[in-house]
Amino acid sequence: MLIPILITLLVLLISTILMFKLKLISPAKRAFIICGPVGTGKTVAFQYLTKGEIPALTVSSLNVSQNELQLDGEYSKQSTFKNIEVFDFPGNGKLKNLYLRPFLKRELSRVIGVIYMIDSSAFDKDKCHEIAQDLLELLKITESKPNGVDILLYCNKSDLFTSKKKNKVKELLQEEMVNLIEFNKRGLNKVSGNEDMEEIDDYGLDAVSTGLVDGKFQFQFLEGNVTFEEGNIWKQDKRSSMIDWIMEKVVN
């Protein structure tokens, strides 16, 4: 009775070791992250990048979506553009803390770009503060990586009458980042209980603070390249600014 149990345990142990070694040997797939507030078009962007189609209807997801990047035409046949994953993270604040931040902390080395979706038609003072705070938490992690992680801030719905242009969105976010960085430096929103994340917060805040020059914050001084583009994800063609940005990151 004891021998079969020992054999079973031995087989499980060997299988676990083999799987672990295979994971070490197999190169991790490169990855793009899609994130941002709720209702900004993240799910549409995910479908566009992984299936080449624009869904007629989407609902806010409570889970992380994952699929491989799929480009149309000649690029789909090139090995350079294969084996690249795209992750779509929920926009809910609590779910970001549950999924996005731990994922980035664990998998940052294989992330080659972050697409942050913004609804430029609803970009008011409150939304600017919310997005700037969100970006600060994101940058604390991405800027902790050597050379940082490149980020695309995609100003969606830019064709609507109420929309702010990408340059205005950038200007307002940079102004808000000054206040948030100073607020964080004073330690007024220090979160305890997770030493690993606190260490990243401390180091990451110093890294993000390099964007402050003469009392003004500018994204261009960060390690990772931060690009602002605008458009309407529901009206994309095969060569949108988002696709161009992704292709540049894959090749480089």
Image: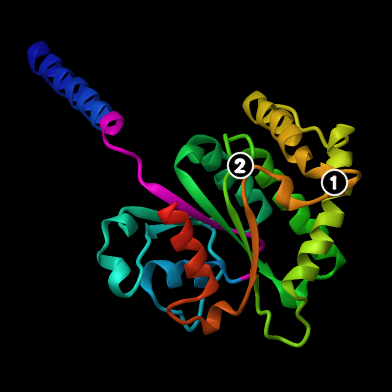
Q: Residue at x 30, y 57 (%)?
A: 82
Q: Amino acid at mark 1?
A: Leu
73 to the left or right of 246: left
Q: Nearer the viewer, residue 167 or 93?
A: 167
Mark count: 2
x and y percent of residue 14 in the render?
17, 21
Tell me the residue at 76%/69% (across/down).
167
Residue 232 vs residue 37, the one in the foreground: 232
Sooner in the amino-acid sequence: mark 1 or mark 2:
2
Q: Which mark is residue 142?
A: 2
Q: Residue shown at 61%/42% (left/top)?
A: 142
Q: Is residue 169 magenta?
A: no
Image position, residue 252 (x, y; %): 45, 51
Tell me the quarter of the picture where residue 22 sits.
top left
Magenta span: 23-40
Q: Is residue 202 above or below residue 36?
A: above
- Residue 212 as seen in the image, left or right of residue 7: right
Which residue in the structure is indicated by mark 1?
Answer: 180
Element carrying mark 2: helix
